[in-house]
């Protein structure tokens, strides 16, 4: 006989069927269907007002849907909210860290609030995983945007939630910080965490996601792998062109050279 936890482990990480949500006369979600495999990165693309954040809020039990069903880690978000909340972590658009505390103190504080054993060891492990060990003793007020975001994500992993929601995680970050966050997200999935990522940036979804869905005016208009989505367009014409460096190539080369020079 399957227990509640074993049933959760055999189900898909996230399943959404016919989800609807309105705010007075404004229909935000109009019958959304998605399924997210365990240990994968699923990107939800859409412009402002498409309904991305509303969907995440429903999946994290912060809002109730008007119609449809949704399960997270095998638990119904409407009927088993406590089990869902134990299974997830939600990271919003802006880093929720205490700037007065050090990075390590932020992590220790959250571990204590979750009543976990040996919060210091948990903090040290996360600092190592997110390449923040050297900065762990510094006040967060001195951190760069990318470092704050990595700390924010690491805080959300305390307690090892199997599912994490990242709502536009690179909002307001510079190019270098954005790449740091991308690497952190890749490492999450490599460790078995299921990631649902909302973003407006096509490049971000292309770089990170195993599957991509486009939410437009409250409906999923396409859902598939990057290769499957590219097949929706006419085949590209093959022409010889001399490849020019991209702006990202220029930026990383110059910044890397400057950093190497300063370290010598």
Image (cartoon, rainbow, N blue to C red):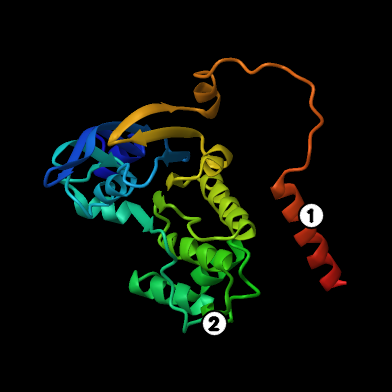
Percent x, y of residue 109: 41, 77
Disc sitting over residue 139 in the figure: 2
- Report the mark closest to the observer, 2 or 1: 1
- Write the residue at 53% across / 50% down: 185
**Rendered location of residue 197, percent (x, y):** 43, 46
User: Which numbered disc, 2 or 1, marks the residue that appears first in the sequence?
Assistant: 2
Gap in angstroms between the C-alphas marked 2 and 1: 30 Å
Quarter of the C terminus within the rendering: bottom right
Horizontal placement of 77 versus 227: left or right?
A: left
Q: Residue under circle 1?
A: 253
Q: Residue furthest bottom?
A: 100
Viewer-nearest residue: 196 or 104: 196
In this orientation, which residue lies closer to the viewer: 18 or 70?
18
Q: Secondary structure at mark 2?
A: loop
The answer to whether 190 is drawn above or below residue 230 in the figure is below
Q: Tell me which corner region of the image, top left, top right, bottom left or bottom right, holds residue 263.
A: bottom right
Side of 105 relative to 245 (left or right): left
Residue 164 place in picture, x, y as percent? 40, 51
* Residue 36 visible in the current orientation: no
Q: How many marks?
A: 2
Label 1 packing within 10 angstroms: few (<14), some (14-19), many (20+): few
- On the question of residue 53 being in view, the answer is yes
Q: Which mark is residue 231?
A: none
Extreme-right residue of the structure:
264
In this view of the protein, which residue sits in the foreground, 231 or 26? 26
């Amino acid at each position: 006989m399957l227990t509640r936890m074993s049933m959760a482990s055999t189900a898909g990480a996230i399943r959404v069927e016919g989800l609807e949500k309105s705010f007075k006369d404004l229909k935000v979600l109009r019958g959304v269907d998605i399924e997210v495999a365990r240990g994968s990165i699923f990107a939800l693309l859409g412009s402002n007002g498409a309904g991305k954040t509303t969907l995440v809020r429903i999946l994290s039990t912060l809002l109730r849907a008007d119609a449809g069903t949704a399960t997270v880690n095998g638990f119904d978000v409407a009927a088993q909210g406590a089990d869902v909340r134990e299974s997830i972590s939600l990271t919003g658009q802006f880093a929720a860290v205490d700037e007065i505390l050090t990075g390590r103190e932020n992590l220790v504080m959250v571990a204590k609030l979750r009543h976990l054993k040996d919060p210091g060891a948990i903090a040290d492990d996360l600092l190592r995983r997110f390449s923040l060990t050297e900065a762990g003793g510094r006040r967060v007020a001195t951190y760069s945007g990318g470092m704050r975001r990595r700390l924010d994500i690491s805080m959300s992993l305390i307690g090892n939630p199997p599912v994490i929601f990242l709502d536009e995680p690179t909002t307001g970050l510079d190019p270098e910080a954005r790449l740091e966050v991308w690497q952190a997200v890749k490492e999450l999935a490599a460790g078995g965490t299921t990631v649902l990522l909302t973003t407006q940036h096509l490049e971000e979804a292309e770089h990170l996601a195993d599957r991509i869905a486009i939410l437009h005016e409250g409906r999923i208009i396409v859902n598939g792998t990057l290769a499957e989505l590219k097949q929706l367009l006419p085949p590209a014409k093959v022409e010889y062109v001399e490849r020019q460096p991209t702006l990202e190539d220029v930026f990383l080369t110059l910044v890397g050279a400057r950093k190497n020079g300063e370290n010598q």
